[in-house]
Amino acid sequence: MVTLVNISDQVIGKAGKMKAHQEGLLHRAFSILILNNKKDLLIQKRAFSKYHSGGLWSNTCCGHPKPSEDLKEACHKRLLYEMGFDANLRKLYDFIYRAKLKNNLIEHELDHVYGGVVKDDIQIISNPLEVDDFRWISLDYLETDMHINPHNYTKWFLHIIDFMKEHKGLIKKLFE
């Protein structure tokens, strides 16, 4: 179940996850960016079994809060579930995007982007139901590879990195 919202993030209802993606209904989502002390970003390759965007590289973690769930609490629970650790998270920004995906699905999300910083030696225990692979990557290398190989990345992650490129201060905000 996902939370349907209007463009002001006001709740207007709820729907099943598949229905929301089949009909392109605007719903609430979150994306998490975890960096280490070297300012490398932890990215994950989504499990091939995911109902959309399987096998594509994406941000550290993402999900949909349940209709009755606090957004930040949902972020912490999902990070622990997908990557096996938790972190201090700070809200970075929100954006709305709409993208057609394979299997005739449509992502139409109001995405709340959170970020956090962890030590280089944090133990990562990824959930194989969610994550096929993960790695730390420099933002410069990531931006270059996304430009050359955009088909290797999720649609929302491309949006996030483009926005971060234009607003370099957001990364600095995480280290304050």
Image (cartoon, rainbow, N blue to C red):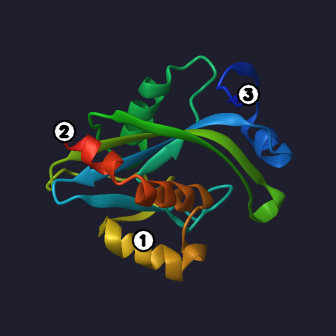
Where is residue 24 drawn, in percent x and y?
Answer: 81, 45
Tell me whether the residue at label 3 lies in contact with that at label 1, contact meaning CB atoms closer than 8 angstroms.
Answer: no
* Amino acid under disc 1: Glu
Badge 1 density bin: few <14, some 14–19, many ≥20, Cα 10 Å: some
Task: Report whether residue 106 is seen.
Answer: yes
The front one of 25 and 55 is 25
Q: Earlier in the sequence, mark 2 or mark 3?
A: 3
Give the secondary structure at mark 2.
loop
Measure the alpha-carbon separation of dots 1 and 2. Answer: 23 Å
Q: Which mark is residue 176?
A: 2
Lateral position of residue 95 relative to residue 36, left or right: right
Task: Report whether residue 124 is seen.
Answer: no
Q: Earlier in the sequence, mark 1 or mark 2?
A: 1
Q: Residue at x 14, y 55 (%)?
A: 121
Q: Residue at x 23, y 58 (%)?
A: 39
Give the secondary structure at mark 1.
helix
Q: Which mark is residue 1?
A: none
The quadrant of the image that shows the N terminus is top right
Lateral position of residue 99 relative to residue 137, left or right: right
| Above or below for 1 versus 152 | above
The residue under label 1 is 143
Tell me whether the residue at label 2 lies in contact with that at label 3, contact meaning CB atoms closer than 8 angstroms.
Answer: no
